[in-house]
Amino acid sequence: MRRCVSVLVVVAVLSLLLGGAEGRTTEKRAEQILTRELQNRGIIKSGQFVMSDGSEEIDGEKFWIFRHAADGEYMISTINYYYVSAEDGEIYRYDLIEDELIPIDEVE
């Protein structure tokens, strides 16, 4: 009985860490999804990385915000901002000029 309870606790914790409750994407999982996608597209170069920049709610939907950045000699330079939906893990690039989110599949 004790072992069964321990296994259930481990499964619950892993579920929260990897996918979140009720299908929601956790910040950690969102970072993994984004990093893998940017690497697969060849967007992240040597010396570049993804870092969390908080969250924001837009039209009732929560997004995790990340910076694609590079280490400089004296500072970190932001290359782009990406938003990852906490609901379904979809990735968007933030267009600063137009102030809009563009689905990553529509980014040239």
Image: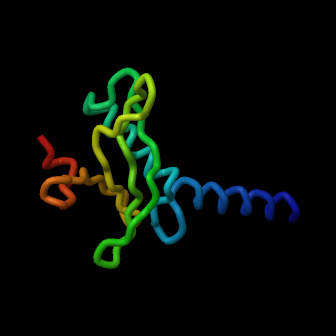
What scheme was used to colour the molecule?
rainbow
Q: Image point 35% across, 56% down: which residue? A: 84
Of residues 58 and 16, the one nearer the viewer is: 58
Report x, y in % for residue 56: 39, 67
Quadrant where the N terminus sits is: bottom right
Q: Is residue 96 left or right of residue 71?
A: left
Report x, y in % for residue 51: 45, 43
Q: Image point 33% across, 30% down: which residue? A: 44
Q: Image point 18% across, 47% down: which residue? A: 105
Among all residues in the image, which is located at the extreme bottom?
60
Question: Is 12 situated above or below 52?
Answer: below
Question: Is 34 situated above or below 3?
Answer: above
Quadrant where the C terminus sits is: top left
The quadrant where residue 35 appears = top left
Report x, y in % for residue 86: 41, 63
Report x, y in % for residue 70: 38, 30
Of residues 9 and 24, the one nearer the viewer is: 24
Of residues 9 and 78, the one nearer the viewer is: 78
Q: Is residue 3 left or right of residue 50?
A: right
Of residues 58 and 34, the one nearer the viewer is: 58
How many marks the image carries: the answer is: 0
Among all residues in the image, which is located at the extreme right?
2
